[in-house]
Amino acid sequence: MDICFDVTVQGSKDSLARLAEVLRRLAEGRPGELDEDSELYWQENLPEWLVSNFATKASGAKSRAWMRMWRWSSESKRIKMERESGWELLDWLYWFSSGNEFWSLSEISWGGGESMSLSLSAADNHIPTQALEWVVEKSGAEIVSIGERDGPR
């Protein structure tokens, strides 16, 4: 991963403290294999305010039915369906795991104010950031910019 992105997040000190806590925990214990054991580990090691925001794990039949409906829907309907269904813990953890080949969180910079900078290392110019956007939103903050870095920091 040799493309770098800078992400600027703004919010109250409390919301950024919540976000920093989650991102630091993920960076320190970067999820590896995503299975039932790791799901239990992260349920116990992520803050309750975040864990309570994950969607309930769907049954296989329910997941297949949802996917069939999603495949036949328009793009705008797909986006709405995705937002309404929410993230299941393991699906969300993937984006912060060693298995994510799209991007990785390489740096968190926050001095206690109302702005935080994140650096992502990416494999491509276009990166899926929905999982990052979700945790930022749930913390009470917002991403104000995501941009490719022109040169080294």
Image (cartoon, grey):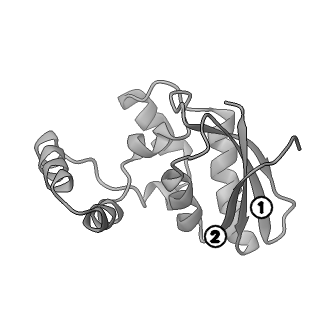
Q: Quadrant of residue 29 in the image?
A: top right
Locate residue 91 relative to residue 80 in the image: left or right.
right
Coordinates of residue 58 in the picture (x, y in percent): 22, 48
In the drawing, what numbered circle is on residue 116? 1
Q: Quote the CA–CA distance across marks 2 and 1.
A: 10 Å
The answer to the question of whether label 2 and label 1 lie on touching residues, with beta carbons closer than 8 A, is: yes
Q: Quadrant of the N terminus?
A: top right
In the rendered image, which residue does mark 2 sit on? 141
Q: Is residue 122 above or below residue 32?
A: below
Question: Which residue appears at 60% of the width and 38% of the height?
Answer: 124
Residue type indicated by callout 2: Ala
Mark 2 lies on a secondary structure that is: loop
Number of other residues with Cα within 10 Å of mark 1, as a class: few under 14, some 14 to 19, many 20 or more: many
* Quadrant assignment for the C terminus: top right
Amino acid carrying label 1: it is Met
Name the residue: 87% across, 60% down: 111
Q: Which residue is located at x 55 percent, y 59 percent?
A: 133
Q: Is residue 21 above or below residue 139?
A: above
Q: Position of residue 139 (x, y in %)?
A: 59, 65
Residue at image position (20%, 55%) is: 70
Side of 9 where 63 appears, left or right: left
Considering depth in this image, is 55 or 106 the residue closer to the camera?
A: 106
